[in-house]
Image (cartoon, rainbow, N blue to C red):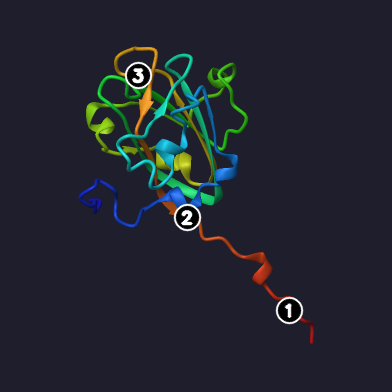
Amino acid sequence: MSAESASGIQKGLVDLVDFIDWSGVECLNQSPVHSLPNALKQGYREDDGLHLESHADEQLLIYIPFSQVVKLHSIAIIGPEEEGPKGVKFFSNREHMGFSNVSDFPPSDTAILSEDNLKGKPLILKYVKFQNVHSLTIFIEDNQAASEITKVQKIALYGTTMETTDMKGLKKIEDH
């Protein structure tokens, strides 16, 4: 039996927002006015007036690199009832994806977001597929109403960091 907090997040997991490498974050087909930081960055994503919005059609392709290796457990994707995401594919450690080649690769996991998910219930990922994650690509295929615009109010990634050895801190052992 797993111990979960009131927010539905399993005990021992952290919000991985502090481990995102912001210099490499990308979002294809985002509105110039309603861009990815509105849904992903702490402070912005808690503001109900801000959101990520698709531009030319309903699809969004989001690339999130991490500053260190993480184990990804679950993801919360919050959005409005009508324009919120519906079909979502997740790709672990898959770089340089575009709309032209996203269907060429098998996703690490897929989901159809429910009304509960859009209100904040996290999606539990196939944990074995997300053990050694350097980056995550999220492909939002469509939205709940099959309309031209998809809106995402918040994306939160939950998991743990990998304990890594700081090689710079190691000292050479001298032979005696």
Asked if the residue at tag 3 contacts the one at tag 1, i.e. Cβ–Cβ closer than 8 Å, the answer is no
Label for residue 5? none
Q: Amino acid at mark 3?
A: Asn
The residue at 32%/24% (across/down) is 84
Comparing labels 1 and 3, the label whose residue is closer to the camera = 3
Mark toward the start of the polypeptide (1 vs 2): 2
Which residue carries the number 1 mark? Answer: 173
Distance in Å between CA atoms under marks 1 and 3: 58 Å
Residue 129 against residue 70 in the figure, above or below: above
Say above or below: 52 vs 87.
Answer: below
According to the image, label 3 marks what residue?
A: 143
What residue occupies the far left of the structure in this picture? 6
| Residue density around tag 2, few if under 14, some if 14–19, many if 20 or more, within 10 Å | some
Of marks 1 and 3, which one's residue comes earlier in the chain? Answer: 3
Question: Which label was assigned to residue 161?
Answer: 2
**x and y, in percent, of residue 27 in the image:** 52, 30
Q: Secondary structure at mark 3?
A: loop
Helix, strand or loop status at disc 2 = strand
Q: Between tags 1 and 2, which lies in front?
A: 2
User: From the viewer's perspective, is 33 left or right of 22?
Assistant: left
Q: Residue at x 22, y 32 (%)?
A: 116
- Displayed quadrant of residue 141: top left
Q: Amino acid at mark 1?
A: Ile
Disc 1 crowd rating (10 Å Cα; few below 14, some 14-19, many 20+) is few
SS of the residue at dot 1? loop
- Residue type, numbered disc 2: Thr
Q: Quadrant of the C terminus?
A: bottom right
**Mark 3: few/some/many CA within 10 Å (<14, 14-19, 20+):** many
Q: Is residue 17 placed above or below 168 in the rendered structure?
A: above
Residue beneath the point at 29% across and 48% down = 9
Sequence-wise, the earlier of marks 3 and 2 is: 3
Q: Between 65 and 174, which is closer to the camera in this rendering?
A: 65
